[in-house]
Image (tube, rainbow, N blue to C red):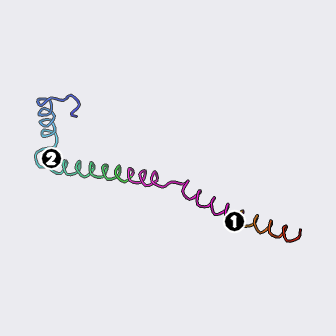
Amino acid sequence: MVLFISGAEIMFIFFVVLLIFGADKIPTIARGLAKGITQVKQATNEIKSEIQKSADIDPTKDLGGELTKEIKEVKKDLTELTHSVKRKL
């Protein structure tokens, strides 16, 4: 997507940049722009990966495991209580 810029307009912009900065500065400017674009892409990829990692972690899995453990402990306590009550009767 070039934002509706035609070839003639791009050449005009390049010509103005050439007049302002000179032929010897254009490669350094292009390298700087490329480095900046690369850093922005890396930052967005890191953010995407962090979001993906946080989305992959399901907090209900850990909660479910803890709940089943607690339920088993409560059942065990209840069976021990009922056994002791039955022995007394």
The magenta-colored residue range is 47-74
Residue depicted at x 22% and y 34%: 1
Residue 67 belongs to magenta span = yes
Which residue lies under the disc numbered 2? 26
Coordinates of residue 80 in the picture (x, y in percent): 77, 69
Residue depicted at x 35% and y 52%: 43
User: Secondary structure under badge 1?
Assistant: helix
> Is tag 2's residue or tag 1's residue first in the polypeptide sequence?
2
Secondary structure mostly taken by the magenta-highlighted segment of the chain: helix
As drawn, is 2 to the left or to the right of 53? left
Coordinates of residue 68 in the picture (x, y in percent): 62, 60
Residue 16 belongs to magenta span = no
As drawn, is 30 to the left or to the right of 74? left
Residue 73's disc is 1
User: Secondary structure under badge 2?
Assistant: helix
Q: Which of 61 and 79 is in front in this view?
A: 79
Coordinates of residue 46 in the picture (x, y in percent): 37, 54
Residue 60's disc is none
Q: Quadrant of residue 74?
A: bottom right
